[in-house]
Image (cartoon, grey):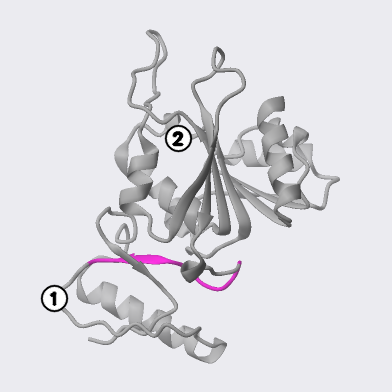
Amino acid sequence: ADFKAEIINIFVEENGIDTVVELGCGDGNQLGLMDVPQYTGYDISKKAVEMCAKKYSADTSKKFIHYLPNQYDGEAKAQLSLSLDIIYHLVEDVVFETYMHHLFQLASDWVIVYSSNSEDPESKGIEHCRNRKFVDWVGANISGWELVNKIKNRYPERSRSDFYIYKKSASFNRHPGEGPTYRLPLLKKTFLFCEQSIGAGKEGLAKLHIVLLFRNIGCMQGLFLAPGYIVKFNAFLCY
């Protein structure tokens, strides 16, 4: 825990990070060692969220949200998003893929993953765990991000996890609240992507076009999460 906090705290200070989200905050014990200006913790366990909210109730720089994957709007919520010892718990492929897409969508600038990066089986007796070569998966399925650093674990005898630091490519930069990055299927239709930022008056219209598109192909949910799709939002879709 101390090693993880040290790496994160140094990174936050050196890169001028003001806002951080963690997808899978758990019981909040790791957070007690972290020094971040504004923190939002998401967890799929409502009990964990309630526990953290109670533990840090006096700290206004921290808030906790019950993570419901099918209700996430795809918007960036912070400059940096964290995944610490979560990936190997995601045994089902669809759960893993949903999580990874949301992890990168939550961040406007940086993503830090602390995880193993292999398909080696866990030790005998350890159940409901699955190691993955997630770096290869990210490279094949997440556009606009670059793996810029790997920090090896100082204590490899305790954990096979290392730090992997991703940076948003300059051409894909967006700031918290600017709008989601959705994954759209390669359909036999013509799309016109407007690269300029959509103003507040047109944003609703853009979302309407997207909703109509989803209805036309008969798939309202799960569309953003399947592999092999192109990425874009803040765009008008014409067909």
Question: Residue drawn 20% across and 71% down?
Answer: 217
In this view, 206 is above or below 43: below
Q: Is residue 227 magenta?
A: no
Res 46 → quadrant: top right
Q: Position of residue 55 (x, y in %)?
A: 77, 36
Question: Residue drawn 37% across and 85% down?
Answer: 236
Q: Position of residue 73 (x, y in %)?
A: 48, 64
Res 26 → quadrant: top right
- Please tell me which of labels 2 and 1 falls first in the chain: 2
Can residue 147 be seen in this snapshot?
yes
Question: Residue drawn 62% across and 36% down?
Answer: 48
The kind of secondary structure element at disc 2 is: helix
Q: Quadrant of the N terminus?
A: top right
Q: Main secondary structure of the magenta part?
A: loop
Extreme residue in the top direction: 124
In this view, 154 is above or below 124: below
What is the crowding at mark 1: few (fewer than 14 residues within 10 Å), some, or many (at least 20)?
few
Q: Quadrant of the C terminus?
A: bottom left
Extreme residue in the left direction: 188
Evaluate if marks 2 and 1 touch, with contact meaning CB atoms under 8 Å apart: no
Three-letter code, disc 1: Lys
Q: Position of residue 152 (x, y in %)?
A: 55, 28
The residue tagged 2 is: 87
The residue tagged 1 is: 188
The residues bearing labels 2 and 1 have C-alpha atoms spaced at a distance of 35 Å
The kind of secondary structure element at disc 1 is: loop
- Magenta highlight range: 176-185
